[in-house]
Image (spheres, rainbow, N blue to C red):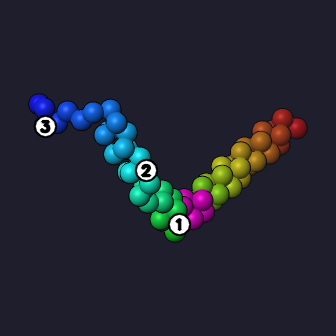
């Protein structure tokens, strides 16, 4: 187990070096996927809004 045990200073040094050489996050590396998610989300919100509007207008016409 002594081979695995690292001192606190060595571990913090390893963490700092890992953070320093870390690449950009996933969203920055894959902007196309984020764009597709945004477009699909916008279309879904529009369709849900249209469905709600139709149901509200149908209830209003039945109530009259």
The mark closer to the camera, 3 or 1, is: 3
Tell me the residue at 24%/35% (across/down).
6
Q: Earlier in the sequence, mark 2 or mark 1?
A: 2
Tell me the residue at 52%/62% (across/down).
28
Q: Main secondary structure of the magenta part?
A: helix
Q: Is residue 21 left or right of residue 40?
A: left
Disc 3 versus disc 1: distance between alpha carbons? 42 Å
State which region is magenta: 34-39
Front-lying residue, 21 or 53: 21
Tell me the residue at 38%/51% (across/down).
17
Indicate the quadrant containing the N terminus: top left, top right, bottom left or bottom right.
top left
Indicate the quadrant containing the C terminus: top left, top right, bottom left or bottom right.
top right
- Image coordinates of residue 51 in percent, x first then y, are 68, 49
Q: Residues within 10 Å of mark 3 (few under 14, many from 20)?
A: few
Tell me the residue at 77%/42% (across/down).
56
**Residue placed under numbered mark 3 in the picture:** 3
Q: Is residue 28 left or right of residue 63?
A: left
**Residue placed under numbered mark 1 in the picture:** 31
Report the residue that reaches farthest toward the right. 64
As drawn, 9 above or below 38: above
Front-lying residue, 30 or 51: 30
Disc 1, SS: helix
Front-lying residue, 40 or 14: 14
Q: Which mark is residue 19?
A: 2
Inspect this view and state whether residue 47 appears: no
């Amino acid at each position: 187990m002594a081979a695995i045990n690292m001192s606190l200073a060595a571990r913090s040094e390893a963490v700092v070096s890992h953070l320093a050489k870390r690449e950009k996050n996933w969203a920055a590396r894959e902007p196309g996927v984020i764009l597709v998610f945004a477009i699909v989300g916008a279309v879904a919100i529009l369709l849900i809004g249209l469905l709600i509007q139709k149901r509200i207008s149908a209830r209003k016409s039945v109530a009259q």
